[in-house]
Amino acid sequence: MKRRTLLRTLAGAAAFAAALTVSATSGLADDPVKVGILIPQSGPAGLFGPSSQNSAELAVAEINGDGGILGRMVEPFYADVGGPPSDAIQAALKLWKGEKVDAFIGMHDSAVRGALVNLFKGQVPYIYTPVYEGGECADGVYVLGETPSQQLEPVIPWLAENKGASKWYLIGNDYNWPRDTNTAAKAYIEASGGTVVGEEYLPFTADNFDSNLAKIKESGADAVLITLVGGASVGFNRAFGSFGLSDDVIRIGTLIEENTLAGIGAENSKNLYSSAGYFANIDTEPAKAFADAYKAKFGDDAPVLNSLGESVYDGLLLLKAIAEKAGSLDVAAMENAAEGVGYSGPRGDATLEQRHTTKDIYLAEANGVDFAVVETFGSVGAGDNCQ
């Protein structure tokens, strides 16, 4: 993605943040399925709001064109959850109790997820779509996003065998997702014959990485696992490239997607990898059909496709699949029907097991400011999340 595309995306995010929380569809049947779409319209993750809304609108149009959910048209209601959990609770309550929505799709951080799980208490279906640390198993909650088991368990041995990764340095922001991800990663590194030579956690406000890069160099690391978020990830990876480490040290990020890569820049992306359930240029017919439909609906200047935004599209497909099998949007009926539900989307075929999706995982290498998939791991499970 070129710099001008990133700037268009940022401009779109700013305009999107000014929008009111409203229904985006008119002229629906008298008894629509009302779905609350909880996405960041502001804050650090606001960059993903426009692509998330576009992906949701595309899914709604396609689902309605195919008869809706249980014969009822889908009506989306959008709310901003880019702020603290307390604000997200109020936004969700407005939709749940005020607009009487039937189900929620959430693309936001884990702190907000935890607050919403405590709010909903299994009374309304809630599909959580982004990458996260694993372990969610509450009634009525179904998880689409990748866990560390999916993003790293097959990938770390591949990097050991194919890229010689054996001495790992772990660096992330200081909260539960990076720490839990690295706890899992240590076991995968050890199983592949590697060792961890350094580990540190930084505040979200970190913007100078000289001392961190010096530690990485001194450690003798030949691989770095990055669980930094947003601007911190961009700043660290830019500094990593300018520090001269990228010639000899590989990097892999589990939250580096197309927007982040554009910020990092082509000059800083050598030997940079990412693992995810979706990339914008996956070379499969479902992924290409989705990209073509996205472009046809929103135009060449639309916010760039990425795994976080696209996950909202898949979230709506998963909601339809569970509800159609259950014959209802009632949580109890969906709970009885959810295990083993399957659907197909841009990511490929997915099956719900222990509330999480088993699906293909793609390992991609940065090629300038684009990703190229170098390996596909088929039908990777999310791990044991419901003990």
Image: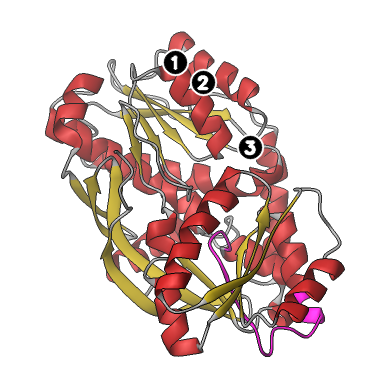
Callout 2 crowding tier (Cα within 10 Å): few <14, some 14–19, many ≥20: many
Q: Where is residue 133 shown, x and y percent of the image? A: 48, 47
Is tag 3's residue or tag 2's residue first in the polypeptide sequence? 3
**Left or right: 212, with 173 as reference point:** right
Q: Quadrant of residue 57?
A: top left
Q: Secondary structure at mark 3?
A: loop
**Left or right: 63, with 325 as reference point:** right
Q: Where is residue 153 shown, x and y percent of the image? A: 39, 66
Q: Amino acid at mark 2?
A: Ala
Q: Secondary structure at mark 2?
A: helix
Residue 41 is marked as: 3
Q: Quadrant of residue 223?
A: bottom right
What residue appears at the point 45 percent right and 71 percent down from the top-left corner? Answer: 190
Q: Are marks 2 and 1 in contact (CB under 8 Å)?
A: yes
- Whether residue 353 is visible: yes
The range drawn in magenta is 240-256
Which residue in the structure is indicated by mark 1? 96
Q: Is residue 192 above or below residue 309?
A: below
Q: Nearer the viewer, residue 54 or 30?
A: 54
Q: Amino acid at mark 1?
A: Trp
Q: Nearer the viewer, residue 277 or 236?
A: 236
Q: Quadrant of residue 244?
A: bottom right
**Left or right: 377, with 353 as reference point:** right
Mark 3, mark 2: which one is toward the viewer? 2
Q: Is residue 56 above or below residue 83?
A: below
Q: Amino acid at mark 3?
A: Gln
Which residue in the structure is indicated by mark 2? 92
What residue appears at the point 57 percent right and 56 percent down from the top-left corner? Answer: 302
Q: Where is residue 120 shown, x and y percent of the image? A: 41, 18
Q: Secondary structure at mark 1?
A: helix
